[in-house]
């Protein structure tokens, strides 16, 4: 049996086991998908081999540690420096990032966009900044601290912390922080968020399955919005396609995986 897992901290909220197991079962594949609470990202590689995994997904806060754990990085993950999917290819760990393309698929319904404000500067923010720019939507980054801004400055993005930021007008406001995931916090102070939303066309929170404080503010502002469910589905479809080595098309996997959202 091929065994897969999702590494994260926290990880109990993750819908990935449900999504992937539903596809494996429906397609009668000899595979199962578990979840693994991982406190220390530097342990990821050892645990991967201890569990004899065929592949894995990686969620908050270990995507950069996962990048470091791989023997080879393919595709857009190279540019991003963060990995959310690992495949075991004959004992070598191959890293990919499916969050980026998953996000672009998710925001299509908002229509054409010129620019975006990304709140947060972690692995997801890197993925989205890279893919937004590739798709002609210029991102600006706003993070709580300066710790993670170097990557963005080095790659030519405008990136600010709460002290250095001056608000402007952005078509799309994106919450990529984990504020609201397992707490009841806004990703930045309420007056600033209200001002940003008053100039925006739409907003998305990459957190899924709950109404975060960020989304509550977006609703109050009356903007079109989404949570992270569509992004979750699309990144999962792409990851599953990698797990099964492309033997089934993404167009076949998508409706099956989507059914698991009804449970
Ligand atoms: P990281 O740990 O890499 O980054 C977390 C970021 O959140 C950092 O910029 C951090 O700021 C910021 N942050 C954390 N807490 C707060 C807070 N209370 N206030 C303000 N900023 C805060 O996480 P990831 O990028 O891997 O993941 C982020 C979120 O995206 C998670 O909730 C994850 O579940 C979700 N996600 C959803 C996906 C989907 O498919 N829908 C796909 C990928 C991720 P600082 O640098 O100052 O610490």
Image (spheres, rainbow, N blue to C red):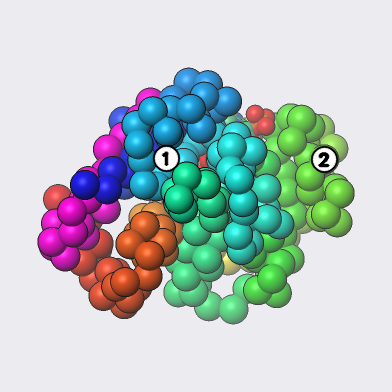
In the displayed structure image, the side of residue 240 where residue 1 appears, left or right: left
Q: Between label 2 and label 1, give the one nearer the viewer.
A: 2
User: Which stretch is magenta?
Assistant: 20-37
Q: Residues within 10 Å of mark 1 (few under 14, many from 20)?
A: many
- Confirm whether the magenta stretch covers residue 29: yes
Residue that label 2 marks: 150
Q: Residues within 10 Å of mark 2 (few under 14, many from 20)?
A: few
- Left or right: 213, with 143 as reference point: left
Compared across the picture, whether 169 is left or right of 239 comes to right
Seen from the viewer's position, the closer of residues 142 and 262 is: 262
Instruction: Decide whether residue 204 is among the magenta residues.
Output: no
Percent position (x, y) of residue 40? 53, 21
Q: Does any portion of residue 216 appear in the rendered image?
A: no
Q: Which mark is residue 188?
A: none
- What residue is rendered at 33% in x and 76% in y? 249
Q: Which mark is residue 212?
A: 1
């Amino acid at each position: 049996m091929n065994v897969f897992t999702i590494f994260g901290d926290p990880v109990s909220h993750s819908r990935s086991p449900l999504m992937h197991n539903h596809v494996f079962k429906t397609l009668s594949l000899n595979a199962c998908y578990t979840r693994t609470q991982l406190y220390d990202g530097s342990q990821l590689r050892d645990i991967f081999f201890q569990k004899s995994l065929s592949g894995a997904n990686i969620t908050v806060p270990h995507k950069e540690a996962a990048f470091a754990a791989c023997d080879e990085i393919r595709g857009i993950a190279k540019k991003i420096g963060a990995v959310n999917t690992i495949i075991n290819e004959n004992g070598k760990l191959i890293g990919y990032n499916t969050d980026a393309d998953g996000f672009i698929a998710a925001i299509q319904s908002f229509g054409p966009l010129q620019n975006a404000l990304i709140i947060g500067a972690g692995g997801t923010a890197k993925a989205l900044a890279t893919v937004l720019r590739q798709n002609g939507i210029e991102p600006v980054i706003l993070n709580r601290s300066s710790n993670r801004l170097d990557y963005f400055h080095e790659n030519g993005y405008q990136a600010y912390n709460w002290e250095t930021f001056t608000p402007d007008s952005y078509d799309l406001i994106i919450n990529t922080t984990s504020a609201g995931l397992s707490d009841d916090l806004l990703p930045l102070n309420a007056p600033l968020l209200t001002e940003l939303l008053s100039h925006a066309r739409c907003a998305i929170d990459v957190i899924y399955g709950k109404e975060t404080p960020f989304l509550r503010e977006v609703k109050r502002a009356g903007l079109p919005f989404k949570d992270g469910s569509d992004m979750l589905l699309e990144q999962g479809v792409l990851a599953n396609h990698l797990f099964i080595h492309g033997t089934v098309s993404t167009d076949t996997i998508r409706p099956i995986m989507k059914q698991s959202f009804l449970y």
